[in-house]
Image (cartoon, grey):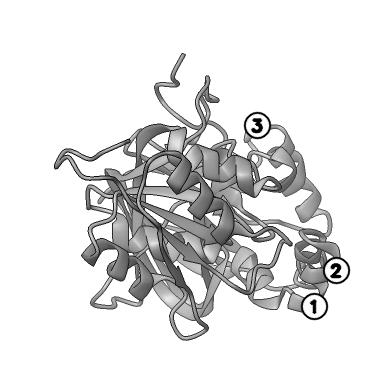
Amino acid sequence: MNTNDGGTAQRAALILNPIKDTGQDVRGIVTRMSLDNGWKEPLVIETTAEDPGHGQAREALDAGVDVVIAAGGDGTVRCVAEELAGTETVMALVPLGTGNLLARNLEIPVDDPEGAVETAFGGTERRIDVVHVTVDRAQDAQVFLVMAGLGFDAAIMSDTRDDLKDKVGWLAYVDAGLRNLPGKPARTTITIDGGKPFERRLRSVMGGNCGKIMGGLEIFPGAKLDDGLMDIMTVAPRGRFGWLAVAGKLFARGKGKDPSLEYFQCSRAEVQLHEPLEVQLDGDPLGKATHMVFEVKPDSLRLRMPHGKKDPAILSNPLP
């Protein structure tokens, strides 16, 4: 029987988004694997429209479980991580959403819930960075694990049709992107690691903790989850074919001198807009804002991931 340091059988908590129906009995899989591994019956808590994961994660922490399994989309994962960051409780993922960006970066199966649950119980453990974000000088910060942004990327998230996501999956984001291509750049002031502020006219400002999105496209080349740093990307298409230049530099992994796409690496960044733009954290639209502060909290989340060599563009010290 597997036990914790206190000599008692271990216990997992499953935080499940019931809307993400994959046809798989995730609750049953976690219960079976818990018992097969000599663990107690899992604590199972469903998210709600009113509480997408925060209260459930706190309940799991209060129950003293050994691992918290977030089963849902990127929003569920982000909310659970926000509560677990800074604690010693391990987090695991069972991706059930459309994007599943953190799972894709970590090579956690996105179409195999049973395989993801196996990783939750038997995978290797790493500590990763979490980025805290303060929006419009709010008293409390929020977190993201993959990427956050203001402007064009956030407008895509807020304008993506849920009914289309159900029908065509991630292609629904392409539809929203095409509909939001027209627009004017916004005057933006950026400060990197407390340095001298500089101004740009931008369509989007994004912060990245790791780099890959759908289709394996790496929009933050070389970004690592455990290096204590994040990447800031500014998007400023110019002229009639400006978006083609942005796309070209993305596919060239940021190489070249085209100012339509710029990268800055830092541990803290402040973004001030002269007009409100849409905001998103790991795909969750938060409405509009004019000010954001990004700050990396290194090694603040214990996370389970599959065994095996990981991409050095994800981890600074991949395991053999």
**Residue under label 2:** 167
Q: Position of residue 48 (x, y in %)?
A: 50, 81
**Residue under label 1:** 163
Q: Position of residue 242 (x, y in %)?
A: 76, 54
Do the CB atoms of the residues marked 2 and 1 lie less than 8 Å apart?
Answer: yes
The mark lying in front, picked from 1 and 3, is: 1
Comparing 91 with 198, the one in front is 91
Q: Position of residue 254 (x, y in %)?
A: 62, 35
- Residue sitting farthest toward the top: 320
Q: Position of residue 12 (x, y in %)?
A: 37, 53
- Residue sitting farthest toward the bottom: 50
Count residues near mark 2 (Cα–Cα under 10 Å), then give few for <14, some for 14-19, many for 20+.
few
Residue at coordinates 63% horizontally, 49% vertically from top-left?
Answer: 113
Q: Amino acid at mark 1?
A: Asp
Residue at coordinates 77% horizontally, 69% vertically from top-left?
Answer: 165
**Residue under label 3:** 256
Residue 18, quarter of picture: bottom right
Res 219 visible: no
The answer to whether 240 appears left or right of 193 in the picture is right
Count residues near mark 1 (Cα–Cα under 10 Å), then give few for <14, some for 14-19, many for 20+.
few
The answer to whether 281 appears left or right of 230 in the picture is right
Q: Amino acid at mark 3?
A: Gly
